């Protein structure tokens, strides 16, 4: 049963989400294991179709379709009596590691993380197969932190319905409206130009349904976003591309981008190929000409200048909250305090391993510190200054999974901004080629008219909503194990975590197991 | 303001196809030969750019493929599969990794900074240089925009002894002749690689690259032929044996010489300086456990330039063999600072400088500049197979290298490195590389962050009943 998503954007609003199975756009979904049927041996008897309870084998009329390998349990299935390879009367079936699996992913987004995120985007649930869905293989930070669940939940009666993931953004009590998000994350800034309008619309529709926000990035405010104004954060960055009084007045929150984690201290760069006529119109520039955002804001060289900036926004839009996005230098704690005194409601720390459409490799790898260090550093400093409860601290830059969100919050953040995870839900495979030529050949980060057509807004909306659904469930399950009724209780609770460098007993925080 | 330094890069294609990361496997049997083959619709046209039939099923290892997996996911019979290329994995070693080698090839070919989309996919941190993150400026400190040419960031350093103060006589004249200085516009000296096929051609390329870059090429005196020494201004002869013939006519034509450290080295320096007062002498000291003390001793005795060298994996020697070059530089730098000698002497470091970021990080740790060798060999398409050392055949025929094209590729690599250095300096808001030296406060060391931030949070005994161990 498919939901009719092609409804009037005006009627699309916040509400509950029931996952809708939304398979891979391409003919062959990628998988860890490869079930292979030797057509020469197969007698079309249909035994495999009958025995497999996971739907790997299906029929089309009297023919048996290609196996759907990604649904397979892998060699773990051998012990089952429905193991198709053994049950096949003609030994036509074989099972082995898919060669592509060895080429997929990297240290941060391992093949398992990609495959499990695709799974969540397809089904809205955690994968039943043996895929690591919590951490990557980077050897530090989130990948070395584990939740230490009590052997038994403290409150056995606590149910998911009783647990709140709400995140209030305005903690200044300054008379400006409160904005409460229903989930403790919102969508990171990706400009129209760096990604396609279909990608933006998919993400904003998911953000709307889950009552959270989407940042426009520095690329203007496409008209297609107007129906979703209440769920849009408009970004003011150093190039001021597409920033108008009107765009600032539309929204409930405005984001000042001082720096970006992937290229701290460097300006943005949109290659000429991506500046299509539509992009150029939005940014008031010339089609085909590369666009550089300067660095830094040349009007800001002090906290006073910074305050002037925020006052300007507050004057233009009296109901808007103001967020300040900064990167993570040595003095990130001072920067955060300065932003608070300048009047920011939200301070967003963008760690050095964050995503980007294009950045020099040297900057991505070497400049500024990872978010895992920056969060506790800033959190503790704000506590010491006595202003922690007046700032909303948002972490971004390397938040890949629901576990990363929970760990960031336990380290001291109030919530997170996510970007790459949504791209992966839309079937990004992290080939690092977003910037080259016509852009992403999988139709996500591109403005090429032909490539954009590879993805529909409906499909994308469902994939991101499914991912959000799976994440919400995981966060609630983590909270339930700790007996917490609200995500707010988790903030700064580093005692819920152990770090594998300092803890050498086995610890398993897989919520698919146990109570 | 000095004249703006510009490195003239020019795309210089490789002579041999590069080793790709992955390879296309193909289950040939069962192919439908369908008219719209995924190979024909490759968004990068990889199959058409190859020298063979685009329906061919073999030998598709190169870098045209960008791993988008559209062919794998599009083939109607699931016959196209990608797998890791074992040849790629075998490139280099655990320090000179395939990724380092491939990035170097790309920079040598294009002269451009490697740029990519998506976030960094590598490890959280690593040993050695990978345990350092550099700082950036925001809001209250201005950054500099060097890369797009809107602000001038100087990457020049000077080699030579610096007096800590000047003395004037009653007439206001300097009472002593200041020691000679050699300015180079980028903090990198080029050195001949320890091995290669066609070494004469490689040296010719190196000397030409040094001229073009206005830096110095460090070459063993014994390897300097009359043709190479014809233009000696950008050559620095090295005397590894400890023996120097003071009558050597080359000495009057070069600006810098390198002597290997030994007991009599200071006497040797003194003799050379008496005869050639304008010559800057550099003493090459191994990065062993005594290096810091030895550097201080040499600086105290008037050494002008010291070259601290580690092995090719940036490891020290003898009892310092488990220490990384960055720590050995820091120790030496600190010792010189403590002894109030740091500003008198120029400190250059070498050994395992593989990427542009290593230049910035070695300087942050306390070096004035670095000396590179292997990356320049990689720029010539070397695969670090070391077949030449075993008397085998060079897979990229280095012995038929065109030295001019080789030199251009080395210039391209240094051009890309220099621009990356500008990125790092610009992000920090520094206007010259001299200011970066020893600026450990503008860097973050993973072990310090771990100690200051994570250790207080996680290395503590937990509440009763919970088993926490470690520390």
Image (cartoon, rainbow, N blue to C red):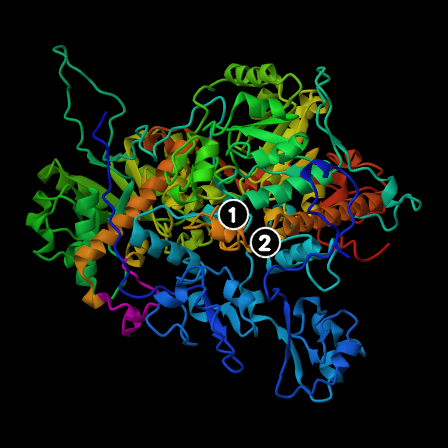
Q: Is residue B382 magenta?
A: yes
Of tags 1 and 2, the one toward the viewer is 1
Q: Is residue B247 visible?
A: no
A267 w.r.t. B211: above or below:
above
Where is residue B339 shown, x and y percent of the image? Answer: 37, 31
| Label 2: element kind | loop
State the mark number for residue A485: none
Q: Could you tell me how many numbered marks the image carries? A: 2
Where is residue B297 shown, x and y percent of the image? Answer: 31, 38
B279 w.r.t. A81: above or below:
above
Please report the bounds of the magenta region as a residue range.
B380-398
Foreground: A449 or A237? A449
Residue assigned mark 1: A445
Q: Residue at x 67, y 51 (%)?
A: A463
Look at the numbered discs 1 and 2 and tell me whether their residues touch, using CB distance below 8 Å: no
Quadrant (top left/top right/bottom left/bottom right) for the N terminus of chain B: top left
Where is residue B353 shown, x and y percent of the image? Answer: 36, 49
Q: Residue at x 76, y 45 (%)?
A: A472
Left or right: residue A484 compared with residue B80: right
Residue assigned mark 2: A109
Q: CA distance from mark 1 to mark 2?
A: 18 Å
Q: Is residue B134 visible?
A: yes
| The residue positioned farthest toward the top in the image shown | B170
Left or right: residue B119 compared with residue A484: left
């Amino acid at each position: 049963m498919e939901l009719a998503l092609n409804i009037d954007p005006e009627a699309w609003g916040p509400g509950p989400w029931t996952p809708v199975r939304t398979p891979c756009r391409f003919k062959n979904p990628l998988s860890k294991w490869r079930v292979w049927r030797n057509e020469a041996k197969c007698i079309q008897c249909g035994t495999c179709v009958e025995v497999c309870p996971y739907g790997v084998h299906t029929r089309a009329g009297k023919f048996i379709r290609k196996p759907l390998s990604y649904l397979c349990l892998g060699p773990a299935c051998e012990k089952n009596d429905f193991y198709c390879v053994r049950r096949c009367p003609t030994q036509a079936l074989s099972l082995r590691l898919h060669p592509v699996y060895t080429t997929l992913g990297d240290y941060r987004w391992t093949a398992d993380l990609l495959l499990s995120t695709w799974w969540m985007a397809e089904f809205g649930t955690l994968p039943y197969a043996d895929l690591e869905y919590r951490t990557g293989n980077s050897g530090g930070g989130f990948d070395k932190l584990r939740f230490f669940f009590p052997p038994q939940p403290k409150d056995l009666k606590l149910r998911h319905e009783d647990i709140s993931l709400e995140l209030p953004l305005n903690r200044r009590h300054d008379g400006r409206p409160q904005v409460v998000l229903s989930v403790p994350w919102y969508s990171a800034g990706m400009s129209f130009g760096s990604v396609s309008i279909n990608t933006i619309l998919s993400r904003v529709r998911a953000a709307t349904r889950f009552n959270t926000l989407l940042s426009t990035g520095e690329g203007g405010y496409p008209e297609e976003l107007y129906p979703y104004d209440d769920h849009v954060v408009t970004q003011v960055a150093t190039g001021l591309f597409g920033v108008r009084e009107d765009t600032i007045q539309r929204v409930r929150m405005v984001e000042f981008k001082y720096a970006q984690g992937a290229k701290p201290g460097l300006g943005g760069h949109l290659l000429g190929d991506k500046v299509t006529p539509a992009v150029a119109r939005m940014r008031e520039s010339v089609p085909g000409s590369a666009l550089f955002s300067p660095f830094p804001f040349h009007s800001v060289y002090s906290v006073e200048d910074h305050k002037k900036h925020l006052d300007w926004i507050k004057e233009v839009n009296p109901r808007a909250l103001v967020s300040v996005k900064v990167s993570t230098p040595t003095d990130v704690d001072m920067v955060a305090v300065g932003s608070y005194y300048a009047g920011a409601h939200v301070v967003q720390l963008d760690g050095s391993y964050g995503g980007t459409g294009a950045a020099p490799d040297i900057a991505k790898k070497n400049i500024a510190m990872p978010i895992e260090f920056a969060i506790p550093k800033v959190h503790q400093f704000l506590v010491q200054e006595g202003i922690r409860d007046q700032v909303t601290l948002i972490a971004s830059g390397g938040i890949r999974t629901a576990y990363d969100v929970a760990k960031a919050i336990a380290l001291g953040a109030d919530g997170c901004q996510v970007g790459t995870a949504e791209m992966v839900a839309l079937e990004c495979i992290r080939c690092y080629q977003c910037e080259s030529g016509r852009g992403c050949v999988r139709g996500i980060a591109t403005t090429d008219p032909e490539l954009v057509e590879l993805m529909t807004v409906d499909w994308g909306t469902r994939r991101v909503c499914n991912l959000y659904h799976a994440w919400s469930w995981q966060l609630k399950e983590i909270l339930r194990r700790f007996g917490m009724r609200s995500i707010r209780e988790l903030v700064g609770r580093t005692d819920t975590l152990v770090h594998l460098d300092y803890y050498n007993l086995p610890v398993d925080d897989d919520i698919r197991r146990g109570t | 303001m000095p004249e703006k330094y510009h490195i003239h890069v020019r795309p210089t294609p490789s002579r041999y196809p590069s080793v790709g990361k992955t390879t296309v496997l193909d289950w040939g049997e069962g192919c439908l030969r369908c008219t719209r083959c995924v190979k024909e619709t490759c968004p990068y046209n990889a199959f058409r750019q190859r020298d063979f039939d685009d329906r061919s099923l073999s030998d598709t290892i190169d870098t045209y493929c960008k791993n988008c997996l559209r062919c794998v996911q599009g083939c109607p019979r699931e016959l196209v599969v990608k797998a890791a290329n074992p040849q790629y994995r075998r490139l280099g070693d655990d320090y000179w990794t395939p990724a380092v080698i491939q990035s170097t090839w790309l920079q040598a070919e294009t002269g451009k900074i490697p740029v990519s989309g998506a976030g960094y996919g590598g490890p959280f941190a690593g040993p050695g240089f990978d345990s350092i993150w550099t700082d950036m400026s925001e809001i209250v400190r201005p950054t500099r925009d060097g890369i797009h040419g809107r602000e001038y960031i100087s990457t020049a350093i000077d080699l030579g002894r610096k007096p800590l103060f000047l003395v004037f006589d009653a007439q206001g004249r300097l009472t002593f002749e200041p020691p000679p200085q050699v300015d180079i516009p980028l903090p990198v000296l080029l050195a001949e690689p320890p091995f290669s096929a066609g070494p004469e051609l490689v040296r010719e390329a190196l000397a030409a690259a040094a001229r073009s870059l206005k830096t110095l090429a460090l070459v063993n005196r014994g390897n300097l032929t009359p043709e190479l020494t014809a233009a000696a201004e950008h050559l620095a002869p090295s005397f590894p044996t400890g023996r120097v013939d003071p009558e050597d006519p080359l000495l009057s034509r070069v600006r810098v010489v390198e002597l290997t450290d030994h007991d009599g080295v200071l006497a040797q320096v003194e003799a050379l300086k008496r005869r050639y007062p304008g010559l800057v002498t550099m003493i090459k000291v191994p990065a062993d456990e005594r290096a810091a003390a030895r550097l201080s001793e040499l600086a105290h005795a008037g050494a002008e330039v010291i070259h601290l060298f580690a092995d090719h994996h940036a490891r020290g020697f003898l009892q310092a063999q488990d220490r990384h070059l960055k720590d050995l530089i820091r120790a030496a730098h600190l010792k010189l600072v403590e002894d109030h000698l740091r500003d008198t002497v120029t400190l250059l470091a070498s050994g395992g400088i593989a990427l542009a970021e290593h230049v910035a990080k070695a300087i942050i740790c306390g070096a004035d500049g670095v000396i590179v060798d292997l990356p320049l060999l990689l720029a010539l398409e070397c695969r670090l197979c070391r077949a030449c050392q075993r008397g085998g055949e060079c897979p990229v025929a280095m012995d038929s290298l065109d030295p001019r094209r080789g030199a251009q590729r080395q210039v391209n690599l240094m051009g890309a490195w220099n621009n990356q250095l500008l990125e790092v300096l610009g992000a920090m808001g520094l206007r010259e590389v001299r200011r970066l030296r020893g600026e450990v406060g503008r860097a973050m060391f993973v072990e310090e962050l771990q100690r200051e931030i994570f250790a207080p949070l996680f290395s503590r005994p937990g509440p009763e009943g919970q088993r926490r161990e470690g520390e």
